[in-house]
Amino acid sequence: MTYTTRRRALTRLLLTCVLGWATSAVTAQTYPSKPVRLIVGFAPGGGTDILARLLAQKLGDDLGQPFIVDNRAGATGMIGAKVVATSAPDGYTLLMGHVNSQAIAPALMDNPQYDPIKDFAPVAYLGFVPNVLVVPARLPVKSVPELVAMAKAKAGGMSFASPGVGSTNHLAGELFRMDSGARLIHVPYRGSGPATVDLLSGVVDMNFDALPSSLANIRAGLLRPLAVTTPKRDPELPDVPTMAELGFKTFDITNWYGLMAPAGTPPAVVATLHAAIQRVLQQPDVVRKMGEWSVRSEPMTSAQFSNFNATEFAKYRDIAKRTGIQLEK
């Protein structure tokens, strides 16, 4: 290669870098310039949808363009996630990510229709909802060791409810069964409501329920909380121990949320969205509402959220291997 050829090649490379930087800078200055679609992989009215609508309203106010919620319910959030995974990476189609769509469901399938790590650009972690192990108040146990002893002694074992196969409730119950040696039978329901009704009436014995679904009945004395599934105690239940405190050292199962964009979305767009979300999460009315919904926020950079998602996916793949749980397509 001659000196002139090398010089031309270097010039082209420098021009490419400068043009890329300029394009990124312009994108950051102009985004968003039209409405943004926020895909929710669950039905209207549920926890993911309610949080998404609050976020959409606040992001629209902050960034000056409407954020429109588009519900694409089905397959534990995977239908909506696939829409975003295959959308143009321009920042105008985003996903209200949930642990089900971004970690659990793909981990429980042999050939999921998208890769929860490679097909997305994590934008911002929003927070998590704790799960709590609850039993009916009439059940004569007041601690996890007492519950384990009863489940081992009772002929046929005991039952645990969940709102469906592959839910955090289900996986927490299976992990508890394996790590405790208790004889437990999974009873799946179509949603938290029916599961709670049967739990209160004694049809089933326990549930690793999402805290918002159980909190009113806990406060009313109808359900007894025995442990939370988070690494730290929850401020709503400060006297209730964690599963880790009780010897289940790797027990960390929560319903978490985060904003996702398609892979390849310009870093400037991701940065703009991330900064806007951090401003939104600090607004007093948002802090108050998330507290009312038992959503615990934790600060993360986009890179930290990406690592967190990868760790969660690996964790649930390991649980799937240990338990043999699989989801059908």
Image (tube, rainbow, N blue to C red):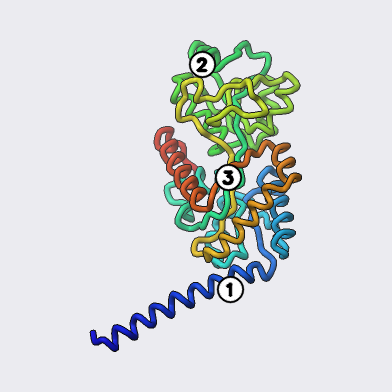
Left or right, residue 62 beside residue 78: right
Residue 169 against residue 239 in the figure, above or below: below
Expressed as whole percent of the image width and height from the top left, the position of residue 305 reads 52, 49
Q: Which residue is mark 3?
A: 299
**Residue sitting nearer the eye, 74 or 9:** 9
| C-alpha distance separating marks 1 and 2 | 60 Å
Q: Which residue is mark 2?
A: 148
Q: Which element carries disc 1, helix, strand or loop?
A: helix
Which residue ends up furthest to the left in the rendered image? 1
Expressed as whole percent of the image width and height from the top left, the position of residue 141 reads 60, 12
Sequence order check, earlier mark of 1 and 2: 1
Q: Which residue is mark 1?
A: 26
| Residue at x 64%, y 14% (from the top left corner) | 139
Q: Nearer the viewer, mark 2 or mark 3?
A: 3
Label placed on residue 203: none
Quadrant in the picture for residue 27 = bottom right
Hey, what amino acid is under mark 1? Val
Left or right, residue 14 beside residue 280: left
Mark 2 Cα shell of 10 Å, populated few (<14), some (14-19), many (≥20): many
